[in-house]
């Protein structure tokens, strides 16, 4: 899969095709640009709603590292391959990047139309993967080693003298990597207009991984991670191995809404986190995209 990082000039083949159209009937084409960023909370941090035994509330969460393996944004209409076809793209390599630094992908040369199906494809790094904004070669190695992953979120949580460090690594064969159905208050997808560039924003919200329910009205909580550390190796560091070892049914004792999307309590707290990952992308501030269950090929 290839991505675009900047607009390029329409190639010779496209220019030749355009030359076949009489000048007074030439097509007026449009463009679409997508900026992939991180939420404000990913930079500024958040405070959870946990209640402590001493009567105080909250842990302060700081996002130390946020990495995504990015392949491409997808645009079009399901079952209509010609809709939203474009004549130009930019550079052609996948990247690993920090969404807090931002990344833009542009599609040029689109006939004016509505593109209702917008999505996003993430993936682990490969041989040709490049460094994107905010990433280092060490980040590529961390995503590629072992079971390949497409996202890493490292967090430090503080409450008074207490500190907990989280290393959350989302493996591609177990976590949603294809997102689709992007819609906002303006509707689904984007509208491409002649001689204009339509701009949209895909916002990664890692703070959603701390929701105590799979719902927009959920509260941020750290208590399940604290429990995972205490039941695992109580060293103040929480890994995916520890959250995978914590049964979700035990987490339910910390809050009444912890459950998988189908309402069941089977599996682990790690499975719950991977389910939350499906709901970490917002679209044009007011909207959202939904991650497909691992193994599904469709990205829209």
Image (cartoon, rainbow, N blue to C red):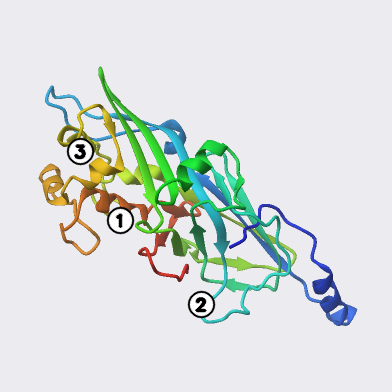
Report helix, strand or loop for mark 2.
loop
Q: Is residue 202 above or below residue 26?
A: above
Q: Earlier in the sequence, mark 2 or mark 1?
A: 2
Horizontal arrangement in the rendering, residue 25 relative to residue 243 (left or right): right
Which residue does the numbered mark 2 point to in the structure image? 78
Classify the position of the N terminus by image quarter: bottom right
Residue under the image location 38 percent in, 49 percent down: 170
Judge the density around disc 1: few (<14), some (14-19), many (≥20) Cα neighbours within 10 Å: many
- Residue 135 at least partly seen: no
x then y, percent, for residue 208: 34, 46
Q: Earlier in the sequence, mark 1 or mark 3?
A: 3
Q: CA distance from mark 3 to mark 2?
A: 42 Å
Which residue does the numbered mark 3 point to in the structure image? 228
x then y, percent, for residue 100: 52, 39
Confirm or deny contact between disc 3 and disc 2 (CB under 8 A).
no
x then y, percent, for residue 66: 46, 39
Q: Earlier in the sequence, mark 3 or mark 2?
A: 2
Q: CA distance from mark 2 to mark 1?
A: 25 Å
Which residue does the numbered mark 1 point to in the structure image? 275
Residue under the image location 17 percent in, 50 percent down: 248
Residue under the image location 73 percent in, 69 percent down: 87
Residue under the image location 68 percent in, 68 percent down: 193
Numbered label attached to residue 64: none
């Amino acid at each position: 899969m290839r991505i675009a990082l900047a607009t390029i000039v329409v190639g010779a083949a496209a220019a030749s095709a355009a030359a076949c159209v009489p000048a007074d009937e030439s097509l007026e084409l449009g463009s679409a640009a997508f900026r992939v960023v991180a939420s404000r909370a990913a930079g500024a941090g958040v405070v959870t709603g946990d209640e402590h035994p001493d009567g105080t509330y909250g842990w302060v969460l700081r996002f130390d590292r946020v990495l995504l393996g990015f392949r491409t944004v997808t645009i079009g209409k399901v079952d209509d391959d010609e809709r939203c076809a474009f004549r130009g793209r930019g550079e052609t390599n996948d990247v690993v990047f920090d969404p807090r630094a931002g990344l833009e992908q542009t599609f040029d040369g689109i006939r004016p139309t509505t593109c209702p199906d917008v999505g996003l494809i993430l993936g682990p790094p490969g041989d040709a993967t490049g460094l994107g904004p905010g990433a280092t070669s060490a980040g590529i190695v961390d995503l590629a080693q072992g079971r390949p992953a497409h996202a890493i979120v490292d967090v430090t949580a503080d409450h008074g003298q207490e500190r907990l460090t989280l290393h959350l690594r989302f493996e591609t064969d177990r976590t949603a990597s294809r997102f689709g159905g992007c819609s906002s208050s303006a509707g689904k997808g984007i509208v491409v207009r002649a001689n204009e560039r339509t701009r949209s924003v895909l916002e990664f919200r890692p703070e959603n991984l701390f929701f105590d329910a799979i719902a927009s009205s959920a509260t941020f909580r750290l208590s399940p991670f604290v429990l995972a550390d205490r039941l695992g190796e109580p060293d103040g560091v929480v890994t995916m191995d520890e959250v995978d070892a914590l049964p979700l049914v035990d987490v339910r004792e910390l809050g009444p809404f912890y459950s998988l999307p189908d309402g069941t309590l089977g599996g682990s707290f790690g499975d719950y986190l991977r389910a939350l990952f499906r709901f970490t992308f917002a679209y044009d501030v007011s909207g959202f995209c939904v991650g497909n269950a691992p193994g599904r090929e469709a990205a829209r």
